[in-house]
Image (tube, grey):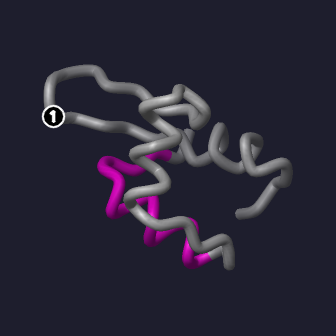
Amino acid sequence: MRKVRGVVALVEYLQSINCPIGKTTIYNLMRSKNIPFNKPAPGVLLFDLDEIDSWLGGDSK
């Protein structure tokens, strides 16, 4: 299971797979629950990259 912690790390991953999405857009997607993420504790955001790849509609690795 590939995971990253925080929105900045997710932005960097998305840029690395040629799918640039900004921090504000990610926060808006999180607010509307349109992107997979986990918040195991206050101030901690985890993104499972396999779930993100599926959410994007492809198997980018």
Tell me the residue that label 1 is attached to: 43
**Range shown magenta:** 3-16
Residue 38 to residue 30: above or below: above
Would you say the magenta stretch is mainly helix, strand or loop? helix
Residue 23 to residue 6: above or below: below
Amino acid type at circle 1 is: Gly
Q: Quadrant of the C terminus?
A: bottom right
Q: Secondary structure at mark 1?
A: loop
Give the residue displayed 43% in from the left and 31% down from the top: 31
Viewer-nearest residue: 61 or 29: 29
Residue 23 percent location from the top left of the image: 39, 61
Residue 59 percent location from the top left of the image: 82, 54
Residue found at the very far top of the displayed protein: 40
Q: Is residue 18 left or right of residue 14?
A: right
Viewer-nearest residue: 19 or 46: 19
Residue found at the very far right of the displayed protein: 58
Residue 45 percent location from the top left of the image: 31, 37
Give the residue displayed 15% in from the left and 25% down from the top: 42
Viewer-nearest residue: 1 or 45: 45
Viewer-nearest residue: 29 or 52: 29
Residue 42 to residue 9: above or below: above
Q: Is residue 19 left or right of residue 56?
A: left
Q: Quadrant of the N terminus?
A: top right
Residue 8 to residue 48: above or below: below
